[in-house]
Structures are given as structure tokens and as C-alpha cells.
Image (cartoon, helix red, strand yellow):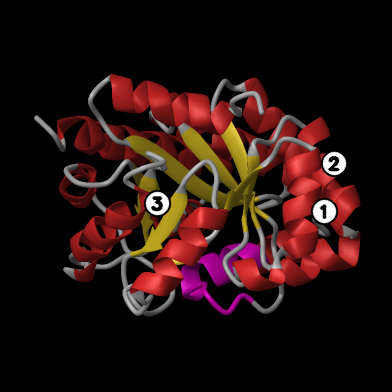
């Protein structure tokens, strides 16, 4: 299979001796056109990869900040087709674009139809936080047919057997959830993150599959800390919070761009 934009982007960051910066934003937050502008600001600030969230009404992994952002997106009428429009605009920035979605919306839309739409929009793959490899046969077939990466999650509670099973089903990268809990900014990175990355690397050593860490990263210093041992640093709630806090979109864009710059500097200094 030809390398995806995600694989190429992560390889370029690795060759540059640094981790990649991966930013998350729900499509349609605060509305579809504005979400595209927010993502452009994230990329301008230094994000290498963008996770475009498919807003969902029952997000079991998301904390209050991302839930609020997703609710705003749903209230503005965001559809799966709108998500693909945001993916297309994201890919046009030069960043690698992946969708992050719970499984139910993909299943409702139609698995094959979703894979085809994502690939047509220039998406590199999808993160499916509540789908486990044993139940992913239909997604494996559709994503393989359309040249998409499959990103599954591992957690501190994952057994060695589970780590091997999950990473074996991944392509692009494996998402290491740094702690047991929901998304959101935290004052410090969970000490379980480095251990989880080390354990995951033990089972991916042969494949070289990148391991990227998310959940709770909210400052440049934390990004630097994680970048010292992970292949990618994933940040979502911090971007959403800056848009939620802003009195208007332009102020929000400035805050998002500045935050991305802070995180990018952290990522680049992590192995200095």
C-alpha cells in the first residue's frame, strides 16, 4: 500500500529528530466554516496532523470541554458530509487529516460509504476509540480497500496480550491514552504515559509503528515532556477551550494559533 499522508508526516517528524504535534477539533465547532478557520490557525501555529472530530451526542471518552464543543457542532447542524468537507479543507493546508469518531456514527452512515467518503476527501485514516480489533472486521476491510490508516487505542490497563493484538491491527500510529479517564487539560502529565509507551514499543519494535500520546496535555512544557519519549503529542481540549473562551472568532483564532506555537516549540525542544 502506498504510504498515507499520515505515515509520511510522522516519518518526516521522526527524521527531523522530533515528535509530531497532533491537534484535535470537532468539525462544525463553532460552525462548519469557522471550524475550518480554526484548523487553519492550528496548522499555521505548527500542528503536523489534525484529528477532525465527528461530533457525537454520547461521547464516553470526552471530558466536559470537548463535549461542549461537540454539542455546539451538533447544534449548528454538522453532518458526516460536513466532516468530510472539513477533512478536505484540512488536507489542503498540507497537514495530514484523520477523523476521530465513535463507531456508531460510522456504522449508521455505512462503513464502506464512510471509508470511500473519507478517502475521497483526502483523509489519511480514522481513530476509532470505542472499536476493538476483534469487532473491526468490516472496518478493516473497508479501510484496506480505500488505503486508509486504522488507529486503535491502548491504555495503561491494557495487558501485554491486548497491546500486541491492538498494535497489530493499527496502521499510521497507535494512540496511547495516557491515563484512565476522559479528555481534558490537566496540571501534569500522568506518570503512566511513559510506561505505556515503553510497553507498547516492546510489542511494536519489529514494525516501527509510531506511538502517539494523548489525554491531558495542556502546556508547551507538558508537550516537551511527552515529546521526549513519544512519536507524537496529541492535544484537543486546550484548542477547544480557547475557542469557547473567546468573545469572537478572530480572538479565538489568535489564541489557537498562539497555543499551537507554544506546543510546537515544546515538541521541538523535547529531545533537545
Q: Around disc 3, counting alpha carbons within 10 Å, would you say few (fewer than 14), some (14 to 19), or many (20 or more)?
A: many
Camera-nearest residue between 245 and 209: 209
Mark 1, secondary structure of its residue: helix
First in sequence: mark 1 or mark 3? 1
The quarter of the displayed image where residue 102 is located: bottom right
- Give the Cα distance between marks 1 and 3: 22 Å
Mark 2, secondary structure of its residue: helix
Reading the image, the residue beneath label 1 is: 80
Mark closer to the observer (2, 3): 2
Specify the label residue 117 is tagged with. 2
Mark 3, secondary structure of its residue: strand
Task: Give the residues drawn in magenta, as a range.
Answer: 59-70
The answer to if 66 sits in the magenta stretch is yes
Q: Around disc 1, counting alpha carbons within 10 Å, would you say few (fewer than 14), some (14 to 19), or many (20 or more)?
A: some
Query: In the image, what residue occupies the spot 61% across and 72% down?
Result: 130
Residue 230: give x, y in percent of width and height.
27, 46
Reading the image, the residue beneath label 3 is: 235
Amino acid at each position: 500500500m502506498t504510504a498515507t499522508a499520515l505515515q509520511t508526516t510522522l516519518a518526516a517528524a521522526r527524521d527531523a529528530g522530533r515528535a509530531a504535534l497532533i491537534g484535535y477539533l470537532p468539525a462544525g465547532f463553532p460552525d462548519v466554516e469557522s471550524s475550518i478557520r480554526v484548523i487553519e490557525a492550528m496548522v499555521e501555529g505548527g500542528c503536523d496532523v489534525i484529528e477532525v472530530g465527528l461530533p457525537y451526542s454520547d461521547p464516553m471518552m470526552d471530558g466536559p470541554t470537548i463535549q461542549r464543543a461537540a454539542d455546539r457542532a451538533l447544534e449548528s447542524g454538522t453532518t458526516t458530509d460536513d466532516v468530510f468537507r472539513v477533512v478536505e479543507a484540512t488536507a489542503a493546508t498540507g497537514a495530514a487529516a484523520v477523523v476521530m469518531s465513535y463507531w456508531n456514527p460510522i456504522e449508521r452512515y455505512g462503513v464502506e460509504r464512510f471509508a470511500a467518503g473519507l478517502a475521497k476527501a483526502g483523509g489519511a485514516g480514522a481513530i476509532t476509540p470505542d472499536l476493538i480489533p476483534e469487532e473491526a472486521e468490516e472496518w478493516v476491510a473497508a479501510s484496506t480497500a480505500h488505503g486508509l490508516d486504522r488507529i486503535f487505542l491502548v491504555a495503561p490497563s491494557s495487558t501485554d496480550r491486548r497491546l500486541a493484538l491492538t498494535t497489530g491491527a493499527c496502521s499510521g500510529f497507535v494512540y496511547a491514552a495516557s491515563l484512565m479517564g476522559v479528555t481534558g487539560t490537566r496540571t501534569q502529565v500522568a506518570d503512566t504515559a511513559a510506561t505505556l509507551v515503553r510497553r507498547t514499543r516492546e510489542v511494536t519494535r519489529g514494525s516501527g509503528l509510531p506511538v502517539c500520546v494523548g489525554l491531558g496535555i495542556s502546556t508547551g512544557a507538558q508537550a516537551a515532556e511527552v515529546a521526549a519519549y513519544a512519536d507524537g503529542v496529541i492535544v484537543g481540549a486546550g484548542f477547544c477551550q480557547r475557542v469557547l473562551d473567546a468573545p469572537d472568532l478572530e480572538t479565538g483564532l489568535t489564541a489557537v494559533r498562539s497555543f499551537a506555537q507554544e506546543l510546537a516549540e515544546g515538541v521541538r525542544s523535547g529531545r533537545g
